Amino acid sequence: MRSPADIFLALKWTSFAHSCVYTALLLCAFAAGKPEPATFVLGLTHGLLWIFMSLACLAGARARIVSFRLAVAVAVLGGLGPFFGSYEFIRESRERVALAQR
C-alpha cells in the first residue's frame, strides 16, 4: 500500500504532466493551425486527465492526502487551465516542507 506522501507526489507529477499536455494543446490549436489528429488527441487527453485528476483529488481531500483548497483548484479550475492545480501542488509542497522544518 502506498503512503499518503507517495500518493501526493504521484498526483503532483500527474498534475505537471497535465499542464504539459494542456500547453501542447494550446500551442497546437492556436500557433500551429489546429492540425488533426494532434489537436483531437491532445484535447481528449486533457479532458480525460482533468476528469481523472478531479476525481483523484476529491478522493484525496476526503482521505486528507491533499487539502480541500487544492482539490477545488484542480476540479473547478482545472478544466479551464490545469496550471491552477499545478500551482496549488507547488504551494502545498512548500507549506508541507515548512511545517516539517518546525
Image: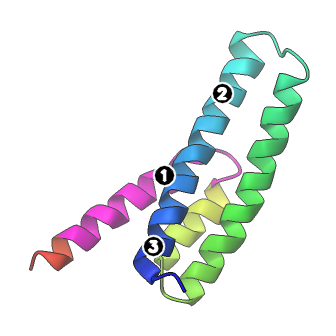
Q: Earlier in the sequence, mark 3 or mark 2?
A: 3
Q: Name the residue under label 3.
A: 6
Please state which amino acid type lies under the numbered disc 3: Asp
Identify the element where label 2 is drawn.
helix
Q: How far apart are marks 1 and 2 (CA)?
A: 16 Å
Please check the rendered image and state whether residue 59 is part of the magenta-colored stretch, yes or no: no
**Badge 3: residue crowd in 10 Å (few <14, some 14–19, many ≥20):** few
Whether residue 87 appears in magenta in the rendering, the answer is yes
Residue 24 bears which disc, if any? 2
**How far is the residue under mark 3 from the one under mark 2?**
27 Å
Q: Nearer the viewer, mark 1 or mark 3?
A: 3
Picture quadrant where residue 25 is located: top right
Magenta range: 78-97
Which quarter shows the C terminus? bottom left
Kind of residue sitting beneath label 1: Ser
Quadrant location of residue 30? top right
Q: In which quarter of the image is residue 40?
A: top right
The residue located at (55%, 82%) in the rendering is 61
The amino acid at mark 2 is Ala
Residue named by callout 1? 86
